[in-house]
Image (cartoon, grey):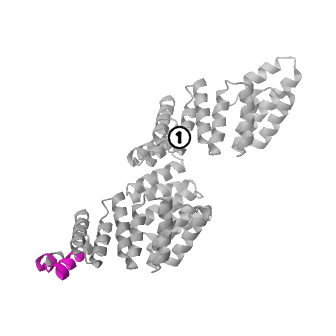
Amino acid sequence: MSYEGSLCKKFLLSADWDRAVAAAYYVRGVAYSDKGDNDRAIADFNQALRLDPNLAAVYTNRGLAYWKKGDYDRAIADLNQALRLDPNDAAAYNNRGIAYKNKGDYDRAIADYTQALRLDPNDAAAYCNRGVAYSAKGDYDRAIADYTEALRLAPNLAVAYKNRGNAYRNKGDNDRAIADYTQALRLDPNDAAAYSNRGLAYTRKGDYDRAIADQSQAIRLDPDFADAYAGRGIAYSDKKDNDRAIADYTQALRLDPNDAAAYCNRGIAYNNKKDYDRAIADLNQALRLAPNLAVAYKNRGNAYRNKGDNDRAIADYTQALRLDPNDAAAYNNRGIAYKNKGDYDRAIADYNEALRLNPNLAAVYYGRGYAYTMKDDYDRAIADYTQAIRLDPDFADAYAGRGSAYFLFKFDFARARADL
């Protein structure tokens, strides 16, 4: 927020020539800032402060210019000074909150936005900004409350709809997310990010064609939008169109070569194509960029297992589980690797843990049933195959496993025949 005419007029009417000239530099600085020429704006604000170092609004606006340049520490220093001179400057609190948010200091950002709202409770932008900080902390309910208040104050604030959509998507409420993104796009049909984010929500709902259409529209609006290519790649991958997925991930990585998730997802697509060496190379790169990316360890484990290197697979699954101990799929996959090595007790222990985390995984019951079969525990094996079939009545391997157990070990030929 800037202050222009009244300050200049006040000083021009005074006899203090220096202060009048300072006001002129200030007003020209604001004009440069509005044009996006932050360097010239800062130069003019410097001149204004040299002539009159007690102009709080100049510090506020120079802080804003530094913030636009990404120099958040200088921005915060200027906004601190503005607030020392004028403790009731709501804009300074709001702008300092933005600087703290961009530095990743969300608690200080929230404190500043809250103070700005105490001074100006009708500032829709401050509510929206505080919502962004709450979202960054994973507090989506408070974020949604703030975006909703922003929209009560400013019903046509497209960014508030988009950001509320993000919060709903992060909560897993994809229908509400899509509704908000759609409203944001009615208000601003050229918002590529809103199309891309709606595309992600459609992907999560399994509506891959709409997801691809939205990501394609985002790319038409912004041909250099790396996240849209990556998002479209996810939709193609989920549609089992691995070649198109790989092409999109590759384009995303040309635009943003430091996107660990895109390397990870391309690695998964290569794994799906049985190109395990390329999969491992991509997953290695993902882990160089993001050493704590549990999903990359898990998927590299999958690639090693598919290559028959069960020891490396087990090491990767173990690392994935150190980083994310609630990943049922990683336990299942490590169980498969142990089973492949003939270590059925460890396999069963991992299958047990996977089922503790998610008791509705038919494949895990099947895997544990196979391990029990190899340990000659046929009653438990049949019970597990039966549970797998209850969860997935079209699970052919589970019928085959149970049928074999009935035939070879229980000599129940009628049930064996029915299953086989």
Q: Position of residue 208 (x, y in %)?
A: 40, 59
Asked if residue 412 is among those painted magenta in the image, a careful observer would answer yes
- Judged left or right of residue 232, residue 386 is left
**Vertical arrangement, residue 45 with respect to residue 240, above or below:** above
Depth check: give the residue in front, 104 or 273.
Answer: 104
Label 1 environment density (alpha carbons within 10 Å; few <14, some 14–19, many ≥20): many
- Judged left or right of residue 76, residue 297 is left
What span is in magenta? 400-416
Q: How many marks?
A: 1
For the point 29% across and 65% down, the residue is 362
Residue 375 visible from this viewpoint: yes
Of the 4 image quadrants, the one containing the C terminus is bottom left
Q: Secondary structure at mark 1?
A: helix
**Vertical arrangement, residue 27 with respect to residue 376, above or below:** above
Residue 356 picture quarter: bottom left
Residue pointed to by mark 1: 134
Residue 220 picture quarter: bottom right
Depth check: give the residue in front, 339 or 187.
Answer: 339
Of the 4 image quadrants, the one containing the N terminus is top right
